[in-house]
Amino acid sequence: MGGLSQRLKIIARNRRRHDPVANVSAGRMAELQLAGILDYRLKSSSYEYVAGLRIPHRKRRREIDFVITTPDEVWAVELKNWSGFVRLDGSNVVQHRAGGRGVVDHGRLLADLRHKQGVLTSYLEDHLDEVPRVWTVLVFANDRVGIDDELLAVDDMDVVRIREFVGALPPAPPQYGPIWGRLRKFFSGEGEEKQKALPTVTDPIRKAREVLASLGTWDLMMLHGGRILSGDVLGLSVEELDDRERFRRLEIDVPRSWLAALNSELSLRVAAVERSGEAVPFELGFEETVKFHRAGQPKPEDFELRDVVGISFGYVSK
């Protein structure tokens, strides 16, 4: 592929980085931290959760940060990693950022959460004979955030800080060493007794969990440099790769080291991982692209596949 000069230009282009955006990374980190808490607190309980669930609605999909199913209810959880003071201004939610960093009008956030709850309820109604109660919880990841009384008094959802939310979850399991824990369960029958003590999961919740398990999450696209984008993959220039029914994810290997310029072949290699787990190899040129519609953006964008490290398909088309 060309002389050394051309090869060096290719490598220089391939080395372009897409660094994480600070505030986006902070929000994602808060979501990961809550997911870790839920993994720990709910693993031995009769609660379950799904992160980033997307509900089909009028040819679109509405995303909910976390959907938690208790033994008899469904919680639609919205997580906000905000600082400072938050208040209601009419129908809008307004944030006064900490350190005098300005005021942000987040618009009709509560109306949007009510709409998401309605979309989730309607979807369950379309698939179940009996729908459990669906309830919205707005959680602030920063325990030091100030919340005005009017916002706290909203009567059709819960508005809480993370500490209060975690306090409403099942208690953390006791901590034992691995050997002592096994002995304790063996001689005391603790595991069996604990299972008997768990609240009984109602039949509507059991069926709701089956329905929710058939849904998916955002598509994720990981760029070289560490930036992760969530949204929808709308198409790839290599049509065979654009098959989410067949493939679970795409792992992309692009030569980025200066030493690679000396290799006899410069190419973009893709391992397309099927839903069965088998990886199918593809060898492509550097001109291939992916059309991606980022969450919250008005229009889709074209990205060069050489800038991408991996793509994860979050749902199967229905």
Image (tube, rainbow, N blue to C red):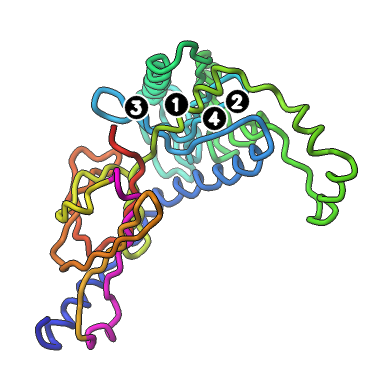
Answer above or below: position of 86 versus 286: above
Vertically, is 146 above or below 130? below
In magenta segment, residue 258: yes
Read off the residue under disc 3: 107
Residue indicated by mark 2: 70
How far is mark 2 from mark 4, CA to CA? 6 Å
Q: Which label sits on residue 211?
A: 1
Q: Position of residue 29 (x, y in %)?
A: 49, 49
The residue drawn where x is 87% and y is 46% is 184
Residue 118 vs 312, above or below: the answer is above
Identified by mark 4, the residue type is Ile
Residue 91 visible, this angle: no
Q: Earlier in the sequence, mark 4 or mark 1?
A: 4
Task: Tell me which amino acid carries mark 3.
Answer: Gly
Q: Is residue 43 magenta?
A: no
Position of the N terminus, as image quadrant, is bottom left
For the point 22% across and 49% down, which residue is it?
242
**Amino acid type for the residue under numbered disc 1:** Val
Q: Kindly state the secondary structure of the residue where label 2 is placed.
A: loop
Mark in front: 2 vs 3: 2
- Cβ atoms under marks 4 and 1 closer than 8 Å: no
Q: Which residues are magenta?
A: 244-263
Question: Looking at this view, is 151 or 111 the one in front?
Answer: 111
Separation of marks 1 and 2 at Cα, in angstroms? 15 Å
- Label 4 near label 2: C-beta < 8 Å? yes
Quadrant location of the C terminus in the rendered image? top left
